[in-house]
Structures are given as C-alpha cells and as structure tokens.
Amino acid sequence: MTQNIYDQEDFFAGYRRLPRSVDGLEGAAEWPAIRALLPAMKGLRVLDLGCGFGWFARWARQEGAASVLAIDVSANMLKRAAEMTKDSAITYASGDMETLDVPAASFDLVYSSLAFHYIANLKHTFAVIHRALVPGAPFVFSVEHPLYTAPSTPGFVTTADGRRVWPLDRYLDESDRKTDWLAKGVIKRHRTVGGYVSLLLGTGFTLTHLEEWGPTAEQIAARPDWAVERDRPPFMLVAARSS
C-alpha cells in the first residue's frame, strides 16, 4: 500500500499552508507549462489521480469537462476537496494507486500532479491507466524530477574550488528513498528519467512530451529566489497518448 503521509497530522499541517494548497493551480509555478499540454476540456470524461484538494477537478469542470473522477489515498485530502466542491459531476473517491482498478475505455483524459513518485508499483498503475483510456486519449502528469528524489544531502554544497553542486546518491539505483520534508521519514520512490519513459513505452503509450521544468525568466524576475531552480529542475512534466 502507498505510504499515506498526507494523513499524518504534522505533514498535513505543513502541506495545507503551501502556496499550491492555499492558491490552487495558480499557486503552482509549473501550472502554465502543464496547462499547455492539456487538451480542450469540453465534454471530456476525466480521471484525476492523487487529486489532493480537488483544484484540478474543479478547473476541468469549469473548462467544460463532462465529468471528473478524482481519486486520492488521503482521507484528509478528500475531506477538504469535498468541502470546497459543490458539483455533482465531480466524484471524489478513496483509492490506492498501487491497486488501482477503473473501468476500461471509460476516460478521455488521465491527469496526475506530483503523485507518482510515491508509488512503488507504477507499472501496474500505468497499465490500468492505459486500459482506462479510450484509444488515442492523452495522459498528462508531473512528478518530482529524479534529481530531487536522489540527493545525498538536503541541498547544494560548495566544493573546495567554490563551485556549487547538487550531489546525488546512487542515481541509477531505482529504489525507495527516505527524506524529511514537512515531516520526518517521508518515503518516495526514486526513478531515473529513463525509468519513467521505459515504463510508459512498455505499457503501450506513445510519448508526446517530456520537459525538465524550470522557472521562466519572467517568473524569476517576480520571484528571484526561484533562480536556484535553473540549476536543478524540480519537476518533470510528461504527456503521452494511449495506443
């Protein structure tokens, strides 16, 4: 079963104060780049995996999606999402992506934001998603960049000759990694860039976009503290199509 860190009270208390929790999609720096990968929503049946507070589900409906099934393993997340939603076309459901099971050919888009790096059995998840999509339908997701899931220290270090580097630990070893983020002992599944791509292709998807996301010059001008993200991209954005 996926580690349900979001129902741990100290973690959830920190998470709900993050800008993306307070301001929704507009509080997520990578949202404009993800939005550019999405199809027109009108009439689509959407599956949102790791839905969190339901920000994407509500946006999809506002953009004309016919229905959204939004799944999360966290009772805290689902409770908050339901409190913020008044739309009978959005269904929030409890579910573990390690054992995900949804009807075949029942969705026109599958979307997930920053959830798959918690999943050990991602091969199963991708296979279920592929089966759930109608042929040719898009699959769009983001994950923490593999540079983020394989660090050997909590941040940059300075070498003897003054260079600032981001040290990695066993980058090619795809395995569970423990980190302290908002709470101690958070488990994330480290995969390489190639690991994600191989899982997609092996499941039958066609890769249509792969982006190692970093802030734009305009974003850095508004938030100079984001300049560091140009040295090690925090997110990987992926788009694919079912066969």
Image (cartoon, rainbow, N blue to C red):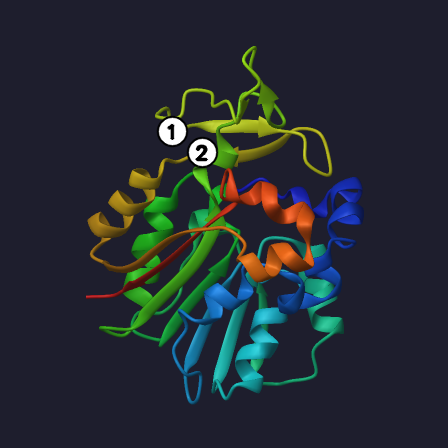
Is disc 2 surrounded by few (<14), some (14 to 19) or many (20+) residues within 10 Å? Answer: many
Q: Looking at the image, which residue is at 71% across and 47% down?
A: 7
Q: Looking at the image, which residue is at 23% across and 73% down?
A: 136
Three-letter amino acid code of the residue under disc 1: Glu
Q: As displayed, is residue 171 above or below residue 242?
A: above
Q: Looking at the image, which residue is at 45% across and 70% down?
A: 47
Three-letter amino acid code of the residue under disc 2: His
Residue to which mark 1 is pinned:
174
Can you give x and y, in whole percent of width and height, for residue 194 in the image? Answer: 29, 39
Q: As displayed, is residue 15 above or below residue 35?
A: above
Q: Secondary structure at mark 1?
A: loop
Can you give x and y, in whole percent of width and height, for residue 129 in the image? Answer: 35, 61
Q: Which mark is residue 31?
A: none
Q: Which mark is residue 190?
A: 2
Dot 2 or dot 1: first in sequence order is 1
Q: As displayed, is residue 137 above or below residue 154?
A: below
Q: Real-space Cα distance between discs 2 and 1?
A: 5 Å
